[in-house]
Image (spheres, grey):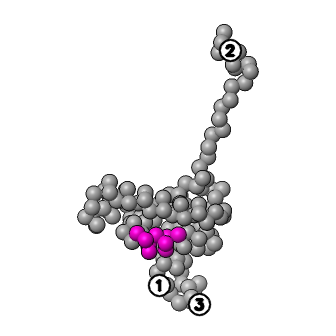
């Protein structure tokens, strides 16, 4: 199971570096490598993962444009939820709920694709193994 906010944080760094297919490119393809980086370095994902997540976010854009806008503002533009709520003139709680809905949509879309992301080892939620009582521990409980 993936920690979807971490996945989207890495995707946001990837998309902010002009790799996303969601918007028009600001620089012609052949000249991109000639220009210096003008953004702060952020955690990013590889192109394969970025394109998969981009596809899911594009589906979100077609079905729920308002949640898409909040997702882009928060993860790509790095805007805090409070500033998004203020700009949209909405309650912050509502913005948080809409962001959670967008995250759930992307997570469900990735689960439906049933593919393994390259960043999975870094963003998986660790589950503690169940503690099983051994025979010696069981005997101490009853005495």
Question: Residue 29, image x and y in percent?
Answer: 56, 88
Residue that numbered label 1 is attached to: 24
Is 85 covered by the magenta stretch?
no
Tell me what residue is drawn at x 59 percent, y 49 percent. Answer: 125
Q: Earlier in the sequence, mark 2 or mark 1?
A: 1
Pick the front one: 58 or 34: 58
Q: In what element is the residue under mark 2?
A: helix
The stretch of residues the image draws in magenta is: 56-64
Tell me what residue is drawn at x 48 percent, y 78 percent. Answer: 22
Residue that numbered label 3 is attached to: 30
Question: Residue 19, image x and y in percent?
Answer: 54, 77
Q: In what element is the residue under mark 3?
A: helix
Q: Earlier in the sequence, mark 3 or mark 2?
A: 3
Q: Foreground mark, 3 or 2?
A: 2
Q: Which of marks 3 and 1 is nearer the N terminus?
A: 1
Tell me what residue is drawn at x 65 percent, y 35 percent. Answer: 130
Question: Residue 141, image x and y in percent?
Answer: 65, 15
- In the picture, the disc for residue 140 is 2
Q: How crowded is mark 2: few (under 14 residues within 10 Å), some or many (20 or more)?
A: few
- In the picture, the disc for residue 74 is none
Tell me what residue is drawn at x 68 percent, y 14 percent. Answer: 140
> Can residue 127 be seen at all in this image of the molecule?
yes
Question: Residue 96, image x and y in percent?
Answer: 37, 56
Q: Foreground mark, 3 or 1?
A: 1
Looking at the image, is 33 positioned above or below residue 65? below
Is 57 covered by the magenta stretch?
yes
Q: Foreground mark, 2 or 1?
A: 2
Q: How far apart are marks 2 and 1 (CA)?
A: 68 Å
Could you tell me what secondary structure mostly forms the magenta stretch? helix
Find out whether the residues at labels 2 and 1 contact each other: C-beta distance under 8 Å: no
């Amino acid at each position: 199971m993936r920690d979807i906010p971490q996945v989207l944080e890495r995707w946001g760094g990837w998309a902010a570096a002009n790799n996303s297919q969601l918007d028009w490119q600001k620089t012609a393809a052949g000249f991109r490598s000639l220009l210096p980086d003008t953004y702060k370095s952020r955690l990013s994902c590889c192109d394969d993962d970025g394109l998969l997540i981009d596809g899911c976010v594009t589906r979100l854009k077609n079905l729920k444009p308002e949640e898409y806008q909040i997702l882009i503002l928060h993860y790509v533009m790095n805007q805090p939820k409070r500033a998004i709520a203020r700009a949209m003139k909405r309650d912050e709680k509502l913005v948080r709920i809409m962001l959670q809905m967008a995250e759930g949509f992307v997570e469900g879309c990735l689960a439906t694709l049933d593919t393994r992301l390259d960043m999975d080892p870094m963003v998986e939620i660790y589950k503690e193994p169940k503690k099983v009582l051994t025979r010696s521990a069981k005997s101490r409980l009853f005495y």
